[in-house]
Image (spheres, rainbow, N blue to C red):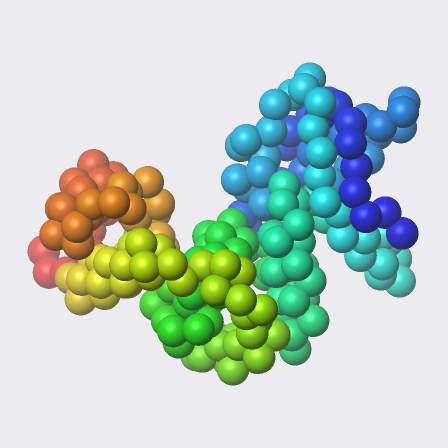
Amino acid sequence: MIGSLRGVVLEALPGAGGQGDLLVEVGGVGYRLTVTAATVAGAGVGEPSFFHVHTHVREDAIVLYGFTTREERRCFEALIAAHGVGPALALAVLSVLSPVGLRQALAGGDLDALTTVPGVGRKTAARLLIELKPRFEPADEHVLGVADGQSHHAAVRSEVRAALAGLGYAPDEVREAIADLDPGANAEAQVRAALRSLASRNRPRVGAGP
């Protein structure tokens, strides 16, 4: 059972659904790791790297999932232990929500945060909330990530998501629009920035008239 790898990244291959692959050479052997899109984007080809690994055994294959932090791997393993959550959905969740963000969403019952994950609607988000919340009980405040500043940023981001949804934007549009917002800005500033981003994409609002 492989629990970690330290080697050189030979290839970084973006994929679909919030995930991709890295080819990591360790001692002359290339290991293919399935990782989040963010990990692919941050990988330095030709550079030495370290990854925490979850070895997933199926009837037809053995798949290695790589993570840059131990906490990210813990979240992945908690996710796939829930009913109806496979590795693909678990990676999609972690591509949108950090471990801290996921714990905050579950602790606060934030369905809007969960619906920013591709393919997750409100009904699925509600089921995931019920399934996952008991699996993410925090050991302490540090693990939960509920320091005052973090809680404030999460509350502001939730307000921004609600405002954009109220204007008729679909979850995938909201997710893209808020991805690069400054978390330190207030809600009004973030909404304005998100609207500028949406306008630059020239996408009509859902349900908007001609």
Q: The C terminus lies in which quarter of the figure?
A: bottom left
The quadrant holding residue 154 is: bottom left
- Left or right of 147? Residue 100 is right
Q: Position of residue 185 (x, y in %)?
A: 20, 45
Q: Position of residue 52 (x, y in %)?
A: 72, 45
**Relative to residue 13, is residue 135 depicted above or below?**
below
- Left or right of 24? Residue 90 is left
- Left or right of 196? Residue 124 is right
The quadrant holding residue 32 is: top right
The residue at the far left in this view is: 210
The answer to whether residue 48 is seen in the rendering is: yes
Give 173 or 182, whichever is nearer the viewer: 182
Q: Position of residue 9 (x, y in %)?
A: 71, 25
- Residue in the image at 60% along x and 29% along y: 43
Give 55 or 165, whichever is nearer the viewer: 55
Q: Position of residue 23 (x, y in %)?
A: 74, 31
- Residue in the image at 38% along x and 59% along y: 147
- Residue in the image at 61% along x and 52% along y: 72
- Residue in the image at 56% along x and 74% along y: 137
Please state the total of marks drawn on the protein image.
0
The answer to whether residue 198 is seen in the rendering is: no
